[in-house]
Image: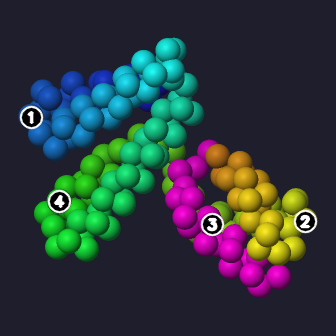
Amino acid sequence: MGIEQRISDDLAAAMKSKDAARTSTLRLVKAQLKNKQIEKGAPLSDDEVNRLLSSMVKQRRDSIEQYTAAGRHELAEKEKNEIAIIEGYLPKVASESEIIAAVDAAINETGASSIKDIGQVMKAALSKLSEFTIDGRTVNQIVRSKLENK
């Protein structure tokens, strides 16, 4: 069963159980998927769905920072709950040790020797971590720290 089908089934179950928060979040996800599908003009692959879901999680993390800075803790909490629901459909999150291992392999593979090579290393590291859900910002920080110490 594809991710989109799982989301549709879970939306129906959430509506039946009158789980308002889950229903609302899954409706947002379904709308985003439909918009992307219309934009593309063809059904989305699971990889494209994962990228869209990751993007939605990133948007919510940014919103949490802004809401917290503005003292809107109730809205930040709502965003955290949405992230938890959306992440349930994403692949496993990469651990820090897995990210470090991928970055080390990418540095060795590309022969990077300075911070100028960050683009090549990021591209190689992200491709090695493609089966995981990752935060690009975390990968970037690890790559920078490794290349600055070279």
Q: Residue at left 56%, top 67%? A: 138
Q: Which residue occupies the foreground of this view, 50 or 65?
A: 65
Looking at the rendered structure, which numbered label has been put on residue 140? 3
Front: mark 1 or 4: 4
Mark 1 to mark 3 CA distance (whole Å) = 41 Å
- Labels 3 and 4: the sequence-earlier one: 4
Q: Which residue occupies the foreground of this view, 117 or 10?
A: 117
Q: Residue at left 25%, top 74%? A: 69
Q: Residue at left 79%, top 69%? A: 116
Q: Position of residue 54 (x, y in %)?
A: 46, 46
Q: Which residue occupies the foreground of this view, 36 or 97?
A: 36
Mark 3 to mark 4 CA distance (whole Å) = 28 Å
Looking at the rendered structure, which numbered label has been put on residue 127? none
Magenta segment range? 131-150
Looking at the rendered structure, which numbered label has been put on residue 111? 2
Q: Pick the quarter of the image with the C terminus.
A: bottom right
Which residue does the numbered mark 1 point to in the structure image? 18
Tell me the amino acid under the disc marked 2. Answer: Gly
Which quadrant holds residue 140?
Answer: bottom right
- Labels 1 and 3: the sequence-earlier one: 1
Characterize the local packing of mark 1: few (<14), some (14-19) or many (20 or more) Cα atoms within 10 angstroms: few
Which residue does the numbered mark 4 point to in the structure image? 75
Looking at the image, the residue that sits furthest to the right is: 111
Q: Position of residue 63 (x, y in %)?
A: 30, 59
Q: Secondary structure at mark 1?
A: loop
